[in-house]
């Protein structure tokens, strides 16, 4: 009998698939819908910032042969709205992880406390937004600063603290600092900073010029990062990046991820893809003789 | 059906003709390679240097797409200034359109520039040989859309103007309320207050009713969360923009409008 339950620190997930931050996670009604209609293991909300953010002007998405490039611009009603949003979520045993994008360690800590007070099961510190100045990647590529933020948040919080890191040369160093400062898990990676130019308009398509590439193109890069992180840190890793089917998810487990988050594939295939991926993992484990996800985690590193 | 990712591709669209349809409303005929939209679906239209906006086409015929545009902001004003030979950029079509395969006759109700997807549905319904009536409401006679076009397609036409300058003096809803019971299906698009009344009437009478609604669509593909209808979590861009009355009942529709970053504005 295959058991799909996984634990990420204190979080208990029914299935190893999380909804990654950014898609469908900005209002209680879409979150409730994902919980109601799928076997999702946990939900990571869209990132909440100190002040409300309208987001960027359109176009906010652009096509490439390799996937979607987006620059939504951290649209969110500001962290104070978490009270109402969290209050309206019908969890049904699905942990809610509140994603936070702030610009100082003090802001991260205050928003995290507010999320905890209002019922969040964990927080994810978004230290890797590829397209909003002062709200991400610059922070994530400075390991000392990552350590400082995690320390400050950890010291005021009881619930797990997850750190979301993006692709930088220093991602392993940042993860090590986060672990040392008390982080409970690391999510990797975020979308990758990109530009798309229309050859007839002869202009970048996105109003923000820069966006984040997601989809199949970034999957092997994300697998490499998870593989490297697994060799260096002890805390659980949540693999994110270009998962479109169960094969990609299993690949992440084998590289060292304890759970996998998905996002842009939902835009392409709809909500039903969540259960398709979960069913695929279940069948693979059954056929290949695995009982628990933990048996797969890091198996590709074997002796 | 193209692969979904392909519908994300920006397609250049050359303007072949510009037609003034009514006061403040123009149609652009565009040559484009996008897939034929189902009436009620929408395309995202990008004017480089301006914004990308959702528009529900008013006609499609052999690679020529017609977009009927009212001036509501900077981007639509720019679109109105464009001339034949100039280009727009289009991706789509997206969303769920009208189901034109429902059985029986159809009452089509349009208010203002909501007439765009309605007249396209009328073309396609007539091609299927369906019995169709068209109610068009506007503030005054110089703002009425597609009256002669509907007649050309042999639809029965009812006109309502707020100032009584042509047809019934009053709203399209008042005209519709007397007719709905005679039809098997209602298709409607226009101001939300009007649509809400039509929804209630159809639910009361048990008439199948499909309504095309408007919210702030930004990505067009169901990821950004700008166009969500609370509390059901329906995404207007990908679960709609056409919904059956039963789906819209008990949502924010007709009561308030949620737009980024989560501000609720009452429907006047």
Image (cartoon, grey):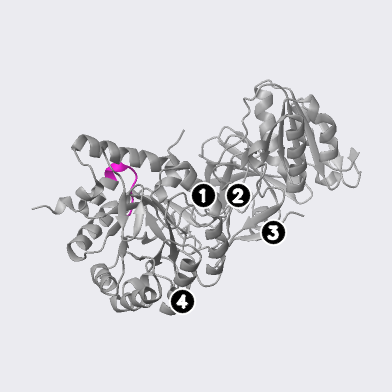
Name the disc covering residue B140, or none. none
- Are circles 2 and 3 on residues that touch, CB within 8 Å? no
Q: Secondary structure at mark 2?
A: loop
Q: Which of marks 3 and 2 precedes in the sequence?
A: 2
Question: Separation of disc 2 and disc 1 at Cα?
Answer: 9 Å
Question: Which image quadrant: the N terminus of chain A?
Answer: top left
Mark 2, Cα crowd under 10 Å, few <14 / some 14-19 / many 20+, is some
Please report the bounds of the magenta region as a residue range: A239-248
Q: Secondary structure at mark 1?
A: helix
| Badge 2 and badge 1 both on one subunit | no
Q: Which residue is mark 1?
A: A32
Name the disc covering residue A107, or none. 4
Q: Secondary structure at mark 4?
A: helix
Residue B27 is situated, as x and y percent measured from the top left of the image, at 69, 44
Q: Nearer the viewer, residue B200 or B4?
A: B200
Q: Nearer the viewer, mark 1 or mark 4?
A: 1
Q: Which residue is mark 2?
A: B231
- Are circles 2 and 1 on residues that touch, CB within 8 Å? yes
């Amino acid at each position: 009998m295959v058991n799909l339950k996984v634990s990420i620190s204190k979080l208990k997930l029914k299935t190893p698939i999380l909804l990654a931050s950014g898609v469908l996670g900005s209002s209680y009604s879409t979150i409730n819908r994902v919980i109601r209609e799928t076997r999702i293991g946990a939900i990571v909300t869209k990132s909440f910032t100190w002040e409300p953010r309208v987001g960027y002007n359109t176009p906010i998405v652009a096509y490439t042969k390799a996937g979607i490039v987006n620059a939504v611009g951290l649209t969110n009603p500001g962290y104070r709205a978490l009270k109402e949003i969290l209050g309206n979520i019908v969890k049904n045993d699905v942990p809610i992880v509140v994603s936070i994008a702030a610009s100082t360690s003090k802001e991260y800590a205050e928003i995290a406390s507010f999320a905890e007070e209002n019922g969040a099961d964990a927080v994810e510190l978004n230290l890797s937004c590829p397209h909003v100045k002062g709200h991400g990647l610059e922070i994530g590529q400075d390991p000392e600063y990552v350590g400082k933020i995690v320390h400050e948040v950890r010291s005021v919080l009881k619930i797990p603290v997850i750190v979301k890191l993006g692709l930088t040369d220093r991602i392993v160093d940042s993860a090590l600092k986060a672990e040392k400062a008390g982080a409970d898990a690391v999510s990797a990676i975020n979308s990758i900073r990109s530009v798309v130019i229309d050859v007839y308009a002869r202009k970048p398509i996105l109003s923000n010029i820069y966006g984040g590439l997601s989809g199949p193109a970034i999957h092997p890069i994300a697998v490499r990062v998870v593989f490297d992180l697994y060799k260096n840190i002890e805390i659980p890793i949540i693999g994110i990046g270009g998962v479109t089917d169960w094969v990609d998810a299993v690949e992440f487990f084998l590289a060292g991820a304890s759970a996998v988050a998905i996002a842009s594939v939902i835009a392409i295939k709809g909500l039903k893809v969540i259960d398709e991926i979960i069913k695929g993992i279940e069948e693979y484990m059954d056929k290949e003789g695995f009982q628990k996800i933990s048996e797969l985690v890091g198996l590709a590193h074997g002796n | 059906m193209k692969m979904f990712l392909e519908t994300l591709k920006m397609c250049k669209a050359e303007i072949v003709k510009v037609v003034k349809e009514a006061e403040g409303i123009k149609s652009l005929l565009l040559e484009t390679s996008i897939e034929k939209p189902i009436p009620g679906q929408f395309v995202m239209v990008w004017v480089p240097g301006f914004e990308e906006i959702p528009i529900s086409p008013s006609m499609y015929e052999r690679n020529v797409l017609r977009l009927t545009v009212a001036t509501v902001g900077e981007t639509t004003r720019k679109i109105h200034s464009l001339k034949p030979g100039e280009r727009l950029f289009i991706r789509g079509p997206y969303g769920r359109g009208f189901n034109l395969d429902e059985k029986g006759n159809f009452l089509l109700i349009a208010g203002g520039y909501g007439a765009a997807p309605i007249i396209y549905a009328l073309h396609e319904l007539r091609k299927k040989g369906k019995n169709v009536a068209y109610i068009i409401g506007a503030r005054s006679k110089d703002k009425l859309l597609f009256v002669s076009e509907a007649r050309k397609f042999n639809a029965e036409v009812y006109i309502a103007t707020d100032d009584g300058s042509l047809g019934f003096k009053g709203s399209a809803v008042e005209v519709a309320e007397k007719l709905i019971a005679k039809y098997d299906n209602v298709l409607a698009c226009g101001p939300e207050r009007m649509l809400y009344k039509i929804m209630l009437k159809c639910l009361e009478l048990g008439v199948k009713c499909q309504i095309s609604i408007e919210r702030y669509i930004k990505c067009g593909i169901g990821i950004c969360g700008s166009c969500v209808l609370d509390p059901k979590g329906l995404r207007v861009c990908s679960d709609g923009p056409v919904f059956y009355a039963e789906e819209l009942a008990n949502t924010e529709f007709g009561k308030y409008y949620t737009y980024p970053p989560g501000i609720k504005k009452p429907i006047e």
